[in-house]
Amino acid sequence: MIACSALATLVLISGCGGGVAGKPAAGSSPPAVDRWPLTGQVAPKTPTEPALSVKIDNAPAAHPQSGLNQADLVFECLVEGGMTRFLAVYQSHSAAVVGPIRSARPVDGALLRALNGGIFAYSGAATGEIAPAKAYSTSFLISDDANPGPFWRKSGPPPGNVYSSTARLRAEAARKSAHPGLPSPLFTYGPAVPGSSPARRLSAMVGGTVRASWVYDGASYLRSENGRPHLLANGQQVRATNVVVLRVKVTHSGITDAAGNEDPFVLAYGSGNAEVFRNGVVEHGRWSRPSVTDAFKFTSTGGGALTLSPGSSWIELVPESGSVSPG
């Protein structure tokens, strides 16, 4: 659709309202701007892509990973043995290589439901691990075990050698005539609250063996893990425009690995404290989501919504027993 103000800019006259060139006519509204719902950034056209979520390994042997910096959102969640695993969510950017891709976990069902389902790619899962995603995520599921076509394996021992690309995974969903719904905005985007406390560094103990730390470089937060820069296969350091810390409850899944470690069931619904680190400052608040069918709500302690800066976001789901510190 060609707006009147756009025509005025092109021909330096207004044939549809008498406005000054390049400006909307008096009393008219500015033209609508399309934005990506998961980043708040301007989109070249109205987004039509569903969220594509991929389960990424974060065991020591999984480093360096691929594709994390192209994700709109990355959730970091506790898994067995005090380690963490990522759910990387893509919509506004593509990634030629994503991985290593690993198995699903119970928390995925609630996280995927918050994204209106979309497409979920993973590499296998025990019956109990994938049950929540099958029960209520509303996602189109693509598993390497059941459908290896969109995946490939690199050299190295399985199961940590499974990779794919966003193009392959979306093509597979299209081939199966899957029509997942589009995600709604997860967060509210806007300017930082005046007077917010400076916070150029933070450290979060998500699991017993994983300490994630972030340093603001003037444009985004750079991630380190256990004291070392978190580098990807292309040599880039993991970065995010926003780091969102959500305190979550963790319960039992009854599922154990070969070493006898129980897989924790991280609850991505309920309520808890929240912190948003953006633009070198932090704002405190609360998050609430009564059930998996409800949307997340983020409220600032100062009133109103917790706001993020437009761009990518990394969400640290920190158990109530975990720790968050300024450095």
Image (cartoon, rainbow, N blue to C red):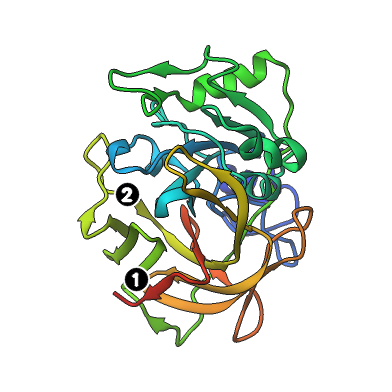
Q: Nearer the viewer, residue 287 or 207?
A: 207
Q: Secondary structure at mark 1?
A: strand
Q: Quadrant of residue 119?
A: top right
Three-letter code for the amino acid on which mark 1 is drawn: Leu
> Which residue in the structure is indicated by mark 2?
238
Residue 62 percent across, percent down from the top left: 32, 37
Three-letter code for the amino acid on which mark 2 is drawn: Val
Residue 199 horizontal side relative to residue 176, left or right: left
Dot 1 or dot 2: first in sequence order is 1
Q: Which quarter of the figure is the C terminus placed in? A: bottom left
* Residue in view at x 36 percent, y 72 percent: 280
Q: Which quarter of the figure is the N terminus placed in? A: top right
Residue 295 horizontal side relative to residue 260, left or right: right
Q: CA distance from mark 1 to mark 2?
A: 15 Å
Q: Is residue 118 visible?
A: no
* Residue in view at x 72 percent, y 44 percent: 116
User: What mark, if any, has residue 202 been given in the picture?
Assistant: 1
Q: Nearer the viewer, residue 186 or 66?
A: 66
Q: Nearer the viewer, residue 139 or 109?
A: 109
- Above or below, 8 relative to 221: above
Residue 87 percent across, percent down from the top left: 51, 44
Q: Nearer the viewer, residue 169 or 133?
A: 133
Q: Secondary structure at mark 2?
A: loop
* Residue in view at x 41 percent, y 39 percent: 57
User: What mark, if any, has residue 264 been given in the picture?
Assistant: none
